[in-house]
Image (cartoon, rainbow, N blue to C red):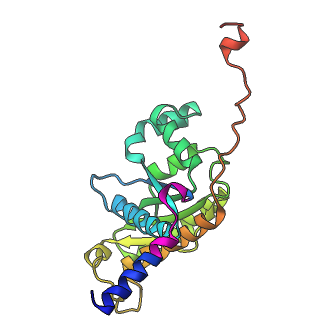
Amino acid sequence: MTDREMTDRAMTDRTASLVPPVEDRPRRTIAVVHAGLGQPSSTRLLADRLADATVRELEALGHEVTVEVVELRDHGHAIIDAMLTGFPTGALADDIETITRADGVIAVTPLFTTTYSGLFKSFVDILDKEVLTGMPVLLGATGGTPRHSLALEYSMRPLFTYLRADVVTTSVFAATDDWAQAGDRARHDDGASSLPERIERAGRSLAAIVSARGEHAKPDDPFSTTPSFLDMLGGD
């Protein structure tokens, strides 16, 4: 074994010794919510890339990470039902519970007519107003041209700020042309960062907030002490 190999081996062993065993690592859950309509879709692709970047950063900080994906396309009819009845049921209710229990959220939508999609907004409308209070949220959006990128700041960010979420400063917009250059980390002619650079920066920002906050405590259920109909009827 050469001196260089011995040095590399020693550095690897030292790094490994600094990382706690998996069972001892603090756990974090990231909920990824996207409103992509196609299968596959560029919106889902961006959501996955943002999740991967966040997971890498959290793991580098010593966390064990679980990613839960919520595809709004699968809940289209249930979301309308929830708007009409006032409460979600079934798989939709389960996914909302997943978001409620998460330590951080990645929310990605396609842009139509310079704003978030109707499916995305309808889902947000059925959420309890307290669900996202204090929740770290990373925003992402996809669209045809870079001209739509400001929709993240004048449309999506105010929406989540209104819901009192802790919105990450860095957001990511991916235009059609960005995907053609997704493997190129060189800066654009106008000096703008490449899509991979923006994704990594955003993932790093979300990971830092999620790591620093500690494990998210689930909000108290206001109906947890309410007796069931069976109890009120004196049934066994």
Q: Quadrant of residue 213?
A: bottom right
Q: Is residue 169 left or right of residue 65?
A: right
Q: Is residue 118 magenta?
A: no
Q: Is residue 182 left or right of residue 121?
A: left
Which residue is located at x 67 percent, y 7 percent?
Answer: 235
Residue 184 location, x and y as percent?
A: 29, 83
Q: How many marks?
A: 0
Q: Quadrant of residue 40?
A: bottom left
Residue 57 visible in the displayed image: yes
Residue 122, compared with residue 110, is above or below; it is: above
Q: In what quadrant of the picture does the C terminus appear?
A: top right
Which residue is located at x 40 percent, y 78 percent?
Answer: 12
Main secondary structure along the magenta-highlighted residues = helix
Q: Which residues are magenta?
A: 15-25
Residue 117 location, x and y as percent?
A: 44, 55
Q: Is residue 18 magenta?
A: yes
Residue 114 visible in the displayed image: no
Which residue is located at x 30 percent, y 76 percent?
Answer: 182
Report the front residue among 5 and 91: 5
Report the front residue among 177 and 204: 204
Q: In what quadrant of the picture does the N terminus appear?
A: bottom left
